[in-house]
Image: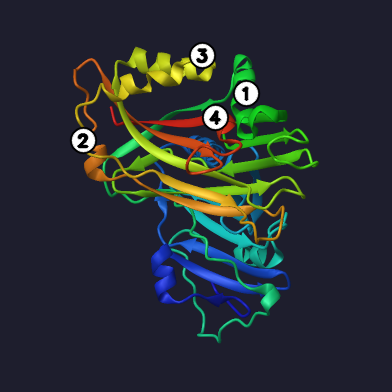
Amino acid sequence: MAVESPWQRAGGDEEQSTDSIILRQPEANGVLEVYLPLHRVRLKTSTDAFFEQLDSGWKARYGDEVGLEWHEIGGVRWRVCRRLSLDSGSVIFQLVTVLGEEAYQVVAVVPPGTRNLPEPVLALLQHSSWGEPAPVVAAEPAPPVKTSPVAAAPEPVKPVPLVPPVPGKPWHLLRQVVVQPGQGQWEQISSAEKDHFGANGLVTGLGLKAGKNGLDWFLEEVAAPGGESGTADPHRYQAHWRLKWSSPADTWREGENQVMALMFSDALDTAQPGNAFGVRYELLGVCAPRSVIVGWLDDLDSGRPGAMNRLGTLTSGCRPQLDGPSPVTVMAGKDAAASVSSQPMNLNATLPLPVEWASAIQARDSRSLRRFLLIMHFMTSATGTSPGDALLKQATVIFVYGPDA
């Protein structure tokens, strides 16, 4: 691959950290970045089966809204995944092709709002050769790219590898369950939220909908004029938040960190400063016979009342464990001095899976299976006592991981 100006190659330390060749080119509305992973993947299955698994993995990781299509560029047929980066708002094109028995990957990071692969990226791929020998970038040293403040480069995005590193024993994602309020719970939730405003409080609207990769909730509470607030303005609290999250990896190895991307959006243009919304990630080991674990998850999935209360029985089925990783909490919101904005807030949660903790998850008897749960809890305050907390306590997302058979 011959690379000519205006493409510029990144420095050695940056390329070493991503295990990729990195090329950049400035544009009017941002900077194009192309990552060329240095290692190819040898297929262990047929090409058709490989691409089916690839599509399933992309949909599981990034949600059903991910864009998948085929492109032929320079005589090479690529499977292309177009998705939004929750880290920076950029658009990421992940391209994969198979030549012989090996898979090659190219990742292009382009400015927000881009719908198609930019012409410079297409031209770069059209003039590239793939196969033996491995793609090589030959370029003379060039001066640094000069960019204006409006075209500043986004933070580097590390491509998702086709084959992750192997630091420890693997655990595999077996199931995801989304828990949300049932039909018979809304009156109780409304009563709990009303208590924030005393005897004169009134909930005029609330709702919550959770899915595989996102949650949407709203709440409006009123304090009647002349009540404890002593004001004629009846509106005391109003919030409407949306959250999208990335799916965890299908395989999580002991000793690895997972970075979960979170995109918060305050849906009200007139939202009150001080509103906040957050997520707490927690890891728990559980041990029980297969029928008990599956029955519990089915009950959660169907909204059976009180099913979540049986979690303690499942954790007690394991032998005494080391203390688990501390829960990781990510909060989005505004303090009272901040200006109101409805722009999304992109945050990350880094989740460790300590080897000594995961390997210590052992069942008390031979009839039981060992699993660990990655649980997402939602809240508006760390204390759990603010408006919205009673509503959000009814929503939980659980990812179930199991070891190799």
Q: CA distance from mark 4 to mark 2?
A: 29 Å
The tag earlier along the polypeptide, 1 or 3, is 1
Marks 1 and 4 in Cβ contact (< 8 Å): no
Q: Which residue is mark 2?
A: 360
Q: Which residue is mark 1?
A: 191
Q: Which residue is mark 3?
A: 304
Q: Nearer the viewer, residue 26 or 79?
A: 26
Label 1, secondary structure: give it.
Answer: helix
Residue at the location (33% across, 23% down)? 312
Among the 4 quarters of the image, the one containing residue 192: top right
The tag earlier along the polypeptide, 4 or 2, is 2
Q: Amino acid at mark 3?
A: Arg
Label 2, secondary structure: give it.
Answer: loop
Residue at the location (66% across, 27% down)? 199
Q: Nearer the viewer, residue 261 or 207?
A: 207
Marks 4 and 3 in Cβ contact (< 8 Å): no
Where residue 264 sits in the image (x, y, percent)? 61, 48
